[in-house]
Image (cartoon, helix red, strand yellow):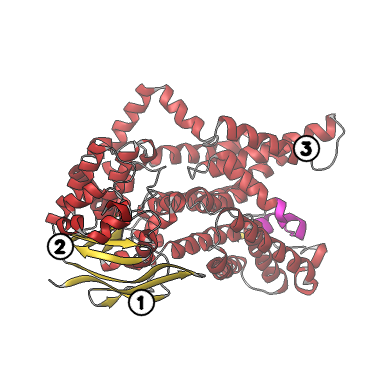
């Protein structure tokens, strides 16, 4: 399989602490890869380096052979990489529909002057954004709530909205930071469903997650991190039997 | 107007028609010269507050330095027309271009700051500009200010006549309001609000948020410059105290009192504060025999009241009125979405 995302030798040191130490792995096209690990293992630091939020001390990330490390955050979307946030970043004072329409903004051509002088491009863009937004809201089952203020939705629905917004412009690759965090069982199932649905449409995923049971269900491959090191990588059934993984999660005595 | 636009942003022309009607009607009822002067000043300041509303209300970038951009407009116009033979309208456009460029250049570094830090940086800029215009005596007249700034004329129409000036300033204000509502009722308006709510999420959606913040900052600064130029030609005089930091704060108070979630909040807030100022001065000086800046105390009180009872600003009273008469609203909505 052609690697879409290549992580090679990523290392991050904060002063004397090495949060992530020489981690390498790949994500192929159409794959769902999960990064798991106990609390404080360095998952979030790793995720932030891959999504260009913080620069690595050494190592780099390539996307389709192009160097991703050092790019600006807004440039990622133009390469076809989308992301969601662990602590939810939706536009709370805007309606569900407007949130979704922002997801399609990258496809639009209106600039400030064109908007001020009301050129025809504005109307075309609004209609295009609306079309994409409604289709995406329909696919995640939020269409009936589109006129609600996003901040008034339940936490689970807000998470779903953030996911919908991330996939509206058809990104090839989606980074999810703890997509199931704070969700109940039904909401978790719904989120897995959305992820698997988008995979079937050709999307690839890398996600960090705490809920190991869900990860086992939907991930094609799992990367396990402990104390900043990659300790295992493989298919879910292999990871479940891996001694180092069991030791990291349950402690030495469990074996 | 398309159905989609009405669904997203509500009616477009309804407030505009009401506004134009009010502007055209007022000169028939207002005859006292000092009240008429206030109406003109409201028109002048509204151009600044509409721009400030785009920046602070929509994009969420609070500026406490807009008096500085007002000053650049007023002084460039004043210096150009008193010390050279350049046409006042050319000077006005030149001032806007200079202000746009200056705001763009200082916007690049300072708009990296957020919240209070940005407000303080813009306040600092205001102080720098204030010191420069007070100190560069040879060019600006220093503390004595610039005198004898000529009146404007437009296609032979003499704007030293207050009535003529009134119509021209409000026509300019209407154009600025139209331009700004167009921005707000477009993907750019949505983008500005999304920067306000979460800049980081806006960036991950492929938007270079920094570029848009700088652009809107420079645009709103050039609006302030336009109103500064008009002020200079109306009063025929400009001096440093007019453009100190308390004027910047006053402009922001106007935006907040009017309502920062609607472009219409800006002219409304400007009108409320200007009339309030007049009433306070009148009452405190003539009846209470208090002198000094009494209005500052009252503004503080007004802000607390507005924030507590009308957090969306005075303009939200209009939508409440609308909601109180659903029958009328439905009827007009049907008419407006029909086309």
Q: How far apart are labels 1 and 2 at the CA level?
A: 25 Å
In front: mark 1 or mark 2?
A: 1
Residue B52 has which mark? none
Do the CB atoms of the residues marked 3 and 1 lie less than 8 Å apart?
no
Please indicate whether residue B303 sits to the left or right of residue A108 in the image: right
Residue ID at (48%, 42%): B261
x, y percentage for residue B203? 39, 60
Q: Earlier in the sequence, mark 1 or mark 2?
A: 2
Residue B122 or B199: which is nearer the viewer? B199
Q: Are marks 1 and 2 in contact (CB under 8 Å)?
A: no
Residue A109 visible in image: no
Q: Dot 3 surroundings within 10 Å: few (below 14), some, or many (20 or more)? A: some
Q: Would residue B58 appear left or right of A117 to someone viewing this image?
A: right
Is B61 situated left or right of A166 in this image?
Answer: right
Subunit that carries the residue with mark 2: A
* Point 69% across, 38% down: residue: B300
Provide the chain ID for the residue under circle 1. Answer: A
Which chain's residue wears label 3?
B
Q: Which residue is mark 1?
A: A59
| Residue A128 percent location from the top left of the image | 23, 53
- Given residues B233 and A154, the one toward you in this image is A154
Residue bearing mark 2: A30
| Range of residues picked out in magenta | B231-246
Q: Which mark is residue B281?
A: 3
The quarter of the rendered structure image containing the C terminus of chain B is top left
Magenta span: chief secondary structure: helix
Q: CA distance from mark 3 to mark 1?
A: 67 Å
**Front position in the image: B161 or A51:** A51
Quarter of the image where one finds residue A67? bottom left
Circle 3 sits in a helix, a strand or a loop, which is it? helix
């Amino acid at each position: 399989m052609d690697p879409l995302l290549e992580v090679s030798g990523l290392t991050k040191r904060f002063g004397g602490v090495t949060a992530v130490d020489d981690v390498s792995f790949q994500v192929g096209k159409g794959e769902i890869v999960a990064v798991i690990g106990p609390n404080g293992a360095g998952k979030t630091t790793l995720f932030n380096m891959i999504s260009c939020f913080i620069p690595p001390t050494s190592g780099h990330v390539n996307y389709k052979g192009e160097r991703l490390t050092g790019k600006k955050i807004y440039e990622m979307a133009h390469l076809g990489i989308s992301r969601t946030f662990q602590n939810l970043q939706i536009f709370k004072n805007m309606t569900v529909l407007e949130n979704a329409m922002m997801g399609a903004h990258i496809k639009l051509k209106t600039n400030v002057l064109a908007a001020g002088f009301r050129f025809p491009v504005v109307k075309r863009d609004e209609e295009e954004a609306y079309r994409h937004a409604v289709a995406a809201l329909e696919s995640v089952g939020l269409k009936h709530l589109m006129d609600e203020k996003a901040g008034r939705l339940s936490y689970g629905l807000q998470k779903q909205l953030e996911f919908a917004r991330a996939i509206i412009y058809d990104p090839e690759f989606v980074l999810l930071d703890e997509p199931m965090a704070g969700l109940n069982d039904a909401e978790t199932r719904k989120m897995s469903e959305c992820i698997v649905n988008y995979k079937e449409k050709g999307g690839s995923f890398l996600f960090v997650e705490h809920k190991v049971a869900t990860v086992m269900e939907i991930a094609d491959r799992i990367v396990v991190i402990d104390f900043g090191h990659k300790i295992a990588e493989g298919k879910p059934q292999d990871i479940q039997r891996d001694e180092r993984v069991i030791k990291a999660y349950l402690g030495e005595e469990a074996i | 107007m398309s159905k989609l636009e009405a669904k997203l942003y509500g009616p477009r022309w309804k407030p505009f028609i009401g506004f134009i009607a009010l502007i055209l009607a007022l000169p028939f009822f207002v005859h006292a010269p000092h009240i008429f002067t206030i109406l003109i000043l409201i028109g002048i300041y509204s151009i600044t507050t509409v721009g400030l509303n785009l920046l602070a209300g929509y994009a969420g970038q609070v500026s406490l330095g807009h008096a500085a951009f007002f000053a650049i407009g007023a002084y460039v116009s004043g210096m150009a027309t008193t010390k050279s033979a350049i046409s006042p309208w050319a000077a006005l456009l030149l001032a806007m271009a200079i202000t746009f460029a200056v705001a763009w250049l200082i916007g690049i570094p300072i708009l990296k700051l957020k919240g209070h830090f940005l407000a303080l940086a813009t306040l600092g800029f205001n102080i720098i500009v204030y010191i420069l215009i007070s100190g560069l005596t040879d060019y600006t007249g220093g503390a004595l200010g610039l005198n004898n700034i000529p009146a404007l004329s437009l296609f032979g129409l003499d704007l030293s006549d207050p009535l003529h000036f009134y119509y021209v300033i409000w026509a300019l204000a209407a154009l600025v309001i139209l331009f700004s509502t167009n921005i707000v009722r477009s993907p750019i308006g949505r983008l500005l609000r999304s920067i306000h709510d979460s800049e980081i999420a806006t960036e991950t959606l492929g938007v270079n948020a920094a570029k848009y913040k700088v652009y809107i900052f420079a645009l709103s600064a050039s609006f302030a410059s336009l109103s500064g130029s008009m002020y200079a030609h109306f009063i025929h005089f400009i001096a440093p105290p007019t453009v100190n930091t308390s004027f910047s704060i006053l402009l922001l108070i106007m935006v907040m009192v009017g309502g920062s979630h609607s472009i219409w909040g800006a002219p409304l807030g400007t009108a409320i504060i200007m009339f309030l100022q007049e009433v306070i001065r009148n009452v405190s000086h003539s009846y209470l025999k208090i002198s000094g800046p009494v209005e500052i105390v009252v503004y503080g009180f007004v802000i607390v009241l507005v924030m507590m009872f009308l957090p969306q600003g005075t303009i939200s009273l209009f939508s409440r009125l609308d909601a109180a008469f659903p029958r009328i609203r439905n009827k007009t909505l049907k008419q407006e979405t029909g086309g």
